[in-house]
Each structure stands twice: as C-alpha cells, then as structure tokens.
Image (cartoon, rainbow, N blue to C red):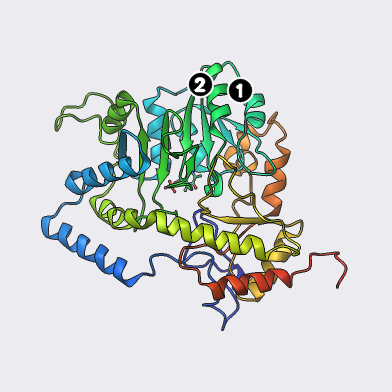
C-alpha cells in the first residue's frame, strides 16, 4: 500500500475504519460513505440549531422530549430514551438490567468492539460467540455453546443492517434465564416478522454516530424498550440518578443526548424510510451486477427479516488485493471488521483458553465493504460494478 493510500480519509465509516484515499486526481470518484449532501436538509437543520441557540437550550428539554416521542413511535416501542452514544446506550441498558461483576454477557465476535466494551464497562465479562457464515450474525446454533450458568444477558447485533433471526435466540436466552439486548446500532428501521428492531428483545441500543443509517452531527444514541421500569431506570442513570434537580436517587452518570443532536435527528427521522429504501435498491443493483465476478455477494434479507444495508459487505479470499484494485480505480472501501473482538489487543486477557471462533476469524480476513449510501448515483454503482468485474484474485487464471 502506498503512503497516499494509507492516509486516513476525512470521513470515517461506522466501523471507525479509515478508507484508503484514492490516488490524486481521483479523489472524488466513489467514496465509501457520503453524508447529508441534500442542501434542503442542511438548511432545515441549521435553522433548527439557530432556534436552539436563540433559546440557549442545549441539554435534554423539549427538543429531546420530542425526539424521544417520535423515535419511540417510529420503533413501535413504548419508550425511547436519548443518550450520548450507542456504547452508552448498551452500557446503560446493561446497568438497568442489573448486569455487573461476576455476570457473563454473550457478544458475537464479529461486531464493532463497542458491543463488548459496554459489557466490560459495567464490570461484567463478555463471552464471545461465533457467527453464521451465511448471514455473519449470531444464530441459535452459535449462541448455544456460549451460554453458561453465569450468563445474564445476550447481545444480538443486527450486523450491517441485516436482522438477526430473533425468535429462536429469545427462546434460548429465556430458557437459560438470560435477558436479550438488541444492538440495533446498524439497523435503524429494519423489520423482523412485522416489527421494527428496537422492540424485539427486552431492551435495545441505537447509535446516531454520523455514518449510521440515522446519524447525528456528532455523537448520540438511544435506548428503546416496552418495559416502563427499565425505561425509568435508564432515564435516571443517564443523568446522575437525579429526580428532581439535585435529588440523587441512584449513582448515575452524564450520558444525555444533546438538544442539538435531537434537532438534527428530528429533521432526519422522517426521511429514514426513504433512505433505507434507497440503500435496498442500490444493494439489489450491486447484487445483480456482481454475478459472475470473483467476489461473494452478501446474504439478502431472510423471508421473515429485513436488511437496511448499513454496509454492503462482499467477501474475497484476496480481500486486500481487491481493495487495492478498487482503490486504484478511485473506489473507496472499508473493512468491518479487520480483527474479531476476541482477537483484539484490548481483549487479549480473554485470549488464553478462548474458544476457537473460526467463522468470525475467517470473515475478518475476507470481508470488504463496498460504497453504500442513500445518495449513491446509478453512475457510481456502475463504476463500482465495472471495477469489481475487472478484478482477478491472486492466483486465478486470466480470462
Ligand atoms: C456504532 C456501533 C456501536 C457504538 O455506537 P457509538 O455511538 O459509536 O458509541 C455499537 N455497536 C455497533 C454494532 C455499532 O455499529
């Protein structure tokens, strides 16, 4: 990789993985993600922020209350609580469930590290599960061997925006006495058996990191649940256990959603379903156009599930060669994720005696996220397809 290619791009994708920068002269070819490029949307958001500035309304308040009501209605859940990030949403959900030291929480090894960090942050221990080779998600089969008598919760990650087959996972977790947390940070708006993600387990976490399907202009997150007691505890925890002012009922933290971010999210939420439809349409064109190429297409939605294509992830046995080939043609790509969580340095302590998780380990070597964002044009899709079709993996016979 050249020095220029190794330089980090200014837009980071959801996995916090910098894309290689295309060679000079091709900088604006096809980015991996492109955010909020609609001038009408930008103007609406700036107006809302100016209004907040006029009122010095920065923390919680009416804008956050309104967003919470709108997001709960969107997710078809009783409650939504705005918080400071997806990681905090997961950690607060765990704390509200009473998960702590001595407890184990099952986390798929093929996810963004935050899915595990939240468990560690509350003093519990992540137990890493492998994932299904077809869907790249946790399944009943990969969950079962990770359950122990100490399992208190299971985190089901709707990775890349593809819904997990929740029913068998909830049944298995219930039988083991464990609660179910959805990590819906990549799947805003997806449906499973008619219901939105966010309402499929006991409690769910969303991230509004800018590159997510619903992104803020900075960090933000939300917890959704139908359980009024959990919702109440999370409201207390996100703001110092305070109710009313300076009456601290429990030890909490600072993990509130900013009013500015709520204002941004309120302007974007009404557009989310159309953006997800655009992502699905782009994915259909990519999948059709990749037939006959040397890469494997991602699994489409299951018949009773959904896919909102937060990422469009192909696999190749020569992934790094594929990325170099695409980069030379001005096409930026990402890797979600290059190291499975249980092999990361941060979780080195978990490695001795750690189970072999062969699917997560193989995926980390083979996955490549192609460009995917709602405003991706037909011309951009064609450029990506032409470039991938021209790719020949190492050791293949030239045609
Ligand atoms: C982005 C993400 C998170 C963390 O969200 P932040 O808002 O960045 O803290 C957690 N889990 C998954 C699967 C994510 O993609």
Above or below, 49 relative to 168? below
Residue positioned most to the left: 55
> Looking at the image, which residue is at 51% across and 54% down?
310
Front in this rendered view, residue 90 or 35: 35
Q: Is residue 216 visible?
A: yes
Front in this rendered view, residue 353 or 64: 64
Image coords of residue 244 (percent x, y): 14, 30
Query: Is label 2 within 8 A of ligand 1 (CB to nearest ligand atom)?
Result: no
Residue positioned most to the right: 397
Q: Which mark is residue 147?
A: 1
Query: Is label 1 within 8 A of ligand 1 (CB to nearest ligand atom)?
Result: no
Above or below, 305 relative to 151? below
Image coords of residue 104 (percent x, y): 54, 24
> Looking at the image, which residue is at 64% across and 71% down?
327
Image coords of residue 371 (percent x, y): 56, 64
Number of marks drawn: 2
Using residue 284 as the reference point, say whether residue 209 is left or right of it: left
For the residue carrying disc 2, how many other residues have a C-alpha within 10 Å: few (<14), some (14-19), or many (20+)?
many
**Position of the C terminus by quadrant:** bottom right
Using residue 357 as the reference point, say whether residue 82 is left or right of it: left
Disc 2, SS = loop
Q: Could you say which quadrant of the image residue 282 lies in?
A: bottom right
For the residue carrying disc 1, how many other residues have a C-alpha within 10 Å: few (<14), some (14-19), or many (20+)?
many
Image coords of residue 31 (percent x, y): 53, 69
Q: Do the residues labelled 1 and 2 touch (CB within 8 Å)?
A: yes
Disc 1, SS = loop
The residue to which callout 2 is attached is 178
């Amino acid at each position: 990789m050249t020095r220029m290619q190794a330089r980090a791009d200014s837009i980071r994708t959801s996995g916090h993985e910098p894309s290689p920068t295309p060679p000079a002269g091709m900088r604006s070819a096809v980015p991996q993600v492109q955010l909020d490029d609609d001038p009408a949307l930008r103007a609406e958001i700036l107006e809302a922020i100016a209004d907040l500035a006029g009122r010095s309304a920065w923390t919680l308040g009416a804008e956050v209350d309104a967003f919470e009501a709108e997001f709960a209605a969107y997710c078809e859940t009783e409650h939504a609580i705005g918080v400071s990030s997806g990681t905090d949403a997961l950690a607060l959900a765990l704390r509200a469930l009473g998960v702590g030291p001595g407890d184990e929480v099952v986390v798929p090894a093929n996810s963004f590290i935050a899915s595990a960090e939240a468990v560690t942050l509350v003093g519990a221990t992540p137990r890493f599960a492998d994932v299904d080779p077809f869907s790249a998600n946790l399944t009943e089969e990969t969950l079962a061997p990770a359950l122990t008598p100490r399992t208190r919760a299971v985190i089901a990650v709707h990775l890349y925006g593809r819904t997990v087959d929740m029913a068998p996972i909830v049944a298995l977790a219930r039988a083991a006495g464990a609660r179910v947390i959805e990590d819906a940070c990549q799947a805003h708006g997806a449906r499973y058996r008619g219901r939105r993600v966010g309402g499929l387990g006991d409690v769910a976490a969303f991230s509004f990191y800018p590159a997510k399907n619903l992104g803020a202009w900075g960090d933000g997150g939300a917890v959704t649940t139908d359980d009024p007691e959990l919702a109440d505890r999370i409201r207390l925890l996100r703001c110092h256990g305070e109710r009313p002012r300076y009456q601290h009922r429990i030890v909490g933290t600072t993990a509130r959603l900013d009013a500015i971010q709520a204002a941004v999210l309120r302007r974007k939420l009404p557009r989310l379903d159309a953006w997800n439809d655009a992502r699905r349409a782009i994915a259909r064109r990519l999948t059709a156009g990749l037939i006959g190429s040397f890469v494997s297409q991602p699994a489409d939605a299951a018949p009773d599930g959904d896919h909102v294509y937060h990422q469009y992830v192909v696999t190749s046995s020569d992934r790094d060669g594929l990325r170099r080939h695409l980069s030379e043609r001005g096409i930026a790509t990402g890797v979600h994720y290059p190291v499975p969580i249980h092999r990361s340095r941060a979780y080195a302590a978990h490695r001795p005696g750690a189970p072999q998780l062969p699917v997560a380990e193989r995926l980390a070597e083979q996955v490549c996220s192609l460009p995917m964002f709602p405003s991706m044009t037909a011309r951009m899709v064609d450029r990506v397809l032409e470039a991938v079709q021209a790719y020949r993996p190492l050791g293949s016979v030239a045609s």
